[in-house]
Amino acid sequence: MAKEINQKEITANMIAKEIIIELKKQRLLKDNIHSAFQKTEILLYNYNNFKETIENKYKQIDTILVEGSNRKSSSITTYSSNSTIESKFEEERAEEQITKIEQSISVTKNFIDTINAAVYKLKGDPYYKIIQLKYFEGKTREEIAEYFDVDVKTITRNKSRLINKLKIDLFSEESLFEMLS
């Protein structure tokens, strides 16, 4: 009886796996991974957050320069009797923190520059401003349609078209793979 139940379970699992594979082939079921289109939108939606993060990181550097390192090592404090040595360790720790923050700023700035360059390529498009209004200013499709004096479907269609152009610049390999698979 246990063998029979186990065999039915195995058969059911095999059938389920075959159904999932077939659904994925027919593009009726997607993996939980974001498409290049979705990743492009995520980057655009977070564009202002990236800029704000850079500002906050510069403030962190200023705070470290004024107040010193925000992490004190108890081992140094406990065993160090020479304030000059302790001060030197504190300066080194502050420099390390600043270096890490500067590296993070650099990475974030590269993302922003990449987004800017990709968006700049769309400047000649009559609906280019959709990107700015939607992602950078948070306008609704209705507000954007009113701005352009067109219907919402026109905005939706052109937004998708522009994102499809941007995704090729921002995620070229993934976009190509998606097109060919």
Image (spheres, grey):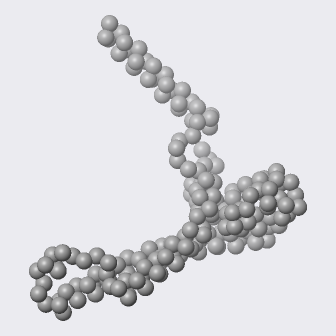
Horizontal side of residue 68 vs 62, given as left or right: left
> Which corner quadrant holds the C terminus?
top right
Please state the total of marks drawn on the protein image: 0
Q: Residue at x 53, y 41 (%)?
A: 31
Residue with the most extreme bottom position = 84
Q: Between 132 and 86, which is closer to the camera in this rendering?
A: 86
Q: Residue at x 79, y 67 (%)?
A: 125
In the figure, residue 137 lies in which quadrant? bottom right
> Which corner quadrant holds the N terminus?
top left
Horizontal side of residue 75 vs 141, given as left or right: left
- Residue 22 position in % (x across, y down): 57, 30
In the figure, residue 97 lies in which quadrant? bottom left
Q: Residue at x 49, y 22 (%)?
A: 15
Above or below: residue 180 compared with residue 164: above
Q: Between 44 and 58, which is closer to the camera in this rendering?
A: 58
Above or below: residue 2 compared with residue 123: above
Q: Residue at x 54, y 26 (%)?
A: 19
In the figure, residue 52 lies in which quadrant? bottom right
Above or below: residue 53 compared with residue 46: below
- Residue 98 position in % (x across, y down): 37, 81
Kindly tell me whether residue 172 is visible in this rendering. Answer: no
- Residue 170 position in % (x across, y down): 60, 63
Residue with the most extreme right position = 149
Horizontal side of residue 144 vs 33, given as left or right: right
